[in-house]
Amino acid sequence: MASILRIKSDEVFFTSGATESNNIALQGLKEYAYSTNKKHIITTSIEHKAILETVKVLQQEGFAVDYISPDISGRISVTDVLEKAGIPFEVYSEVKPNPTIKNVTDGIEACKKSGADVIVAVGGGSSIDTAKGISIVMTNPDRADIVSLNGASNTVNRGMPVIALPTTSGTAAEVTINYVITDEEREVKMVCVDPHDIPIMAIVDSDLMATMPKSLASATGMDALTHAVEGYITKAHNTMSDMFHMKAIKLIFKYLPAAVNEKDEEAIEMMGLAQYIAGMGFSNVGLGIVHSMAHQLGAVYDTPHGLANAILLPTVMRFNGEDPATAQRFREILCEIGRPDAANLNDQDVINTFVWMISELSKSVGITQRVRDVGAKEEDFEMLADKAMQDPCKPGNPREVSKEDFIELFRRAF
């Protein structure tokens, strides 16, 4: 995919490993590097000769990477490139799948010690969210408690520069204004919303996503679908966000099974694109109560976020579909994903069909359908509902929801 997208002042490079694509992306990267005061450079894969040559050229011009925050899926290729180019860096990899306040505070100390001026986040949402938290506190030291970052933030300064290389096809953390950190003491996931945290650059390369194990590819893919569907029906949706979300939904229904089950290269690339454009949408209009509930499963039982979303999505969509306006949104989606007959179905048939298609897609990539399978306990439902009522994603849901509704939804998903 030979394209460079600019979003506000930030850079996004989509590359699938082809020489032409990389040359275009790298030309943009060089132009960006030369036009800023920061000394930074990052590469995608050691197999890309054009990238290695660019590293050498920029190194001669005085550019360097001082700090890198990777996870295992991206560590070898990136660090090998840096080592071969003779560029100094330090690694911080103490990041849990549901990153915690301690992961962020330890990372802040590591960043200070390194004297870095750039953070390179290589990994899924866990690594990138941690990098965002570190980035914000490095330039807003009065928020070092981390807890005060929860919800809509009022930080003063843009975060320390972050360059993101996602290795999963789900969170879109490389483009959103959100990051999620777990407060282990309170067993709460904090959804931090801050336009100051957006990475200055994102390189979305399907090569980095190709090594995901099936369980991770399926969970993150369904996470992307949840973003797209919730973004399409949220109260704040608009014509622009609808465009992004509908395209993402169509791509995910078409390509997720092949990306997960066959490791098809085109499908993996399209999933990388789908999750990214879904992020462009929901970052502007918000999400809904699938996320409000999934955040609690992650905080209390350490359930992987994408898996939690996948399990809850059918149940919550059946609930939301009882709102006639939302049922119409489902009808619009069905007409775009192979069910044009939905235009003539009544609302209940539309809801049943849409929920069935979500469930079948989820089953096709091996996702469990019950929250009990990830450790949820029925005696915890009231506590989970109390926490979900306070979640920042709740207000965006198209249908009003009470504590009793949450308890019933957890029960239905059990």
Image (cartoon, grey):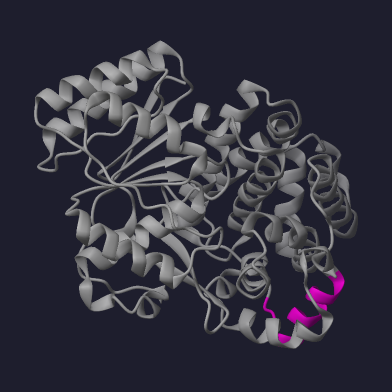
Task: Look at the image and tell me in which quarter the C terminus lies.
Answer: bottom right
Q: Residue 253 appears at what percent x and percent y?
A: 72, 37
Query: Residue at the spot x=28%, y=60% of the render?
Result: 110
Query: Residue at the spot x=58%, y=46% of the render?
Result: 170
**Magenta residues, as a range?**
400-412
Which of the 4 image quadrants contains residue 397? Answer: bottom right
Which of the 4 image quadrants contains residue 44? Answer: top left
> In the picture shown, does residue 213 fall above or below 403?
above
- What secondary structure do most residues of the magenta stretch adopt? helix
Q: Is residue 161 left or right of residue 5?
A: left
Report if residue 410 lies within the magenta region: yes
Query: Residue at the spot x=53%, y=77% of the render?
Result: 184
The residue closer to the viewer here, 207 or 90, is: 90
Q: Is residue 155 left or right of residue 146?
A: left
Q: Is residue 348 left or right of residue 40?
A: right
Is residue 159 among the parts visible in the rendering? Answer: no
> In the picture shown, does residue 263 fall above or below 118?
above
Q: Residue 338 appears at what percent x and percent y?
A: 79, 34
> In the picture shown, does residue 220 fall above or below 151?
above
